[in-house]
Amino acid sequence: MKTLEEHFDDLDRMIDTGAAKPAIRDQIAFIWKQVSTLQMEHAALEQAYQELHTGLEERLAKIQERDKQDVRRWFAEKSKSLAESQKRHTLNHQV
């Protein structure tokens, strides 16, 4: 299978050798069809990339929020534990 560049080279040779207009037009039409297909594929890939990127951003935000909640929960537990420990070790003075 030829590359797009090779098809352009063929077109260039056709023009240089004075090929018939219908043959040149067919080559141009073929190249245009290939370019149009590539444009559609590019657009589809770009959309898929955007959807993937958005989905990953959402997942990352959820993970970060869950991590924040875990840190808050851990901090609250440690604070409560420290407060209980201080309470047990504090002398109660009644005056």
Image (cartoon, rainbow, N blue to C red):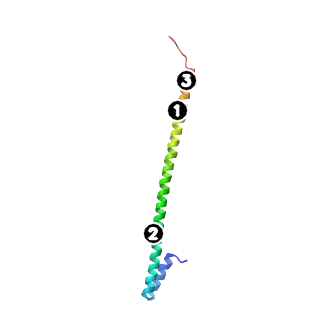
Q: Residue at x 47, y 78 (%)?
A: 30
Q: Nearer the viewer, mark 3 or mark 2?
A: 2
Residue 45, above or below 82: below
Mark 3 crowdedness (10 Å alpha carbons): few <14, some 14-19, many ≥20: few
Residue 67 image point, x, y percent: 53, 42
Residue 29 image point, x, y percent: 44, 79
Mark 2 crowdedness (10 Å alpha carbons): few <14, some 14-19, many ≥20: few
The reply, left or right, for residue 20 in relation to residue 77 is left
Q: Are marks 3 and 2 in contact (CB under 8 Å)?
A: no
Measure the alpha-carbon separation of dots 2 and 1.
55 Å
Q: Which residue is mark 3?
A: 86
Measure the alpha-carbon separation of dots 3 and 2.
69 Å
Q: Which mark is residue 39?
A: 2
* Residue at the top extreme of this rendering: 95
Q: Which amino acid lies under the numbered mark 3 shown in the image of this protein? A: Gln
Q: Residue at x 47, y 62 (%)?
A: 46
Measure the alpha-carbon separation of dots 1 and 3.
15 Å
Q: Earlier in the sequence, mark 1 or mark 3?
A: 1
Q: Earlier in the sequence, mark 3 or mark 2?
A: 2
Q: Which residue is mark 1?
A: 76
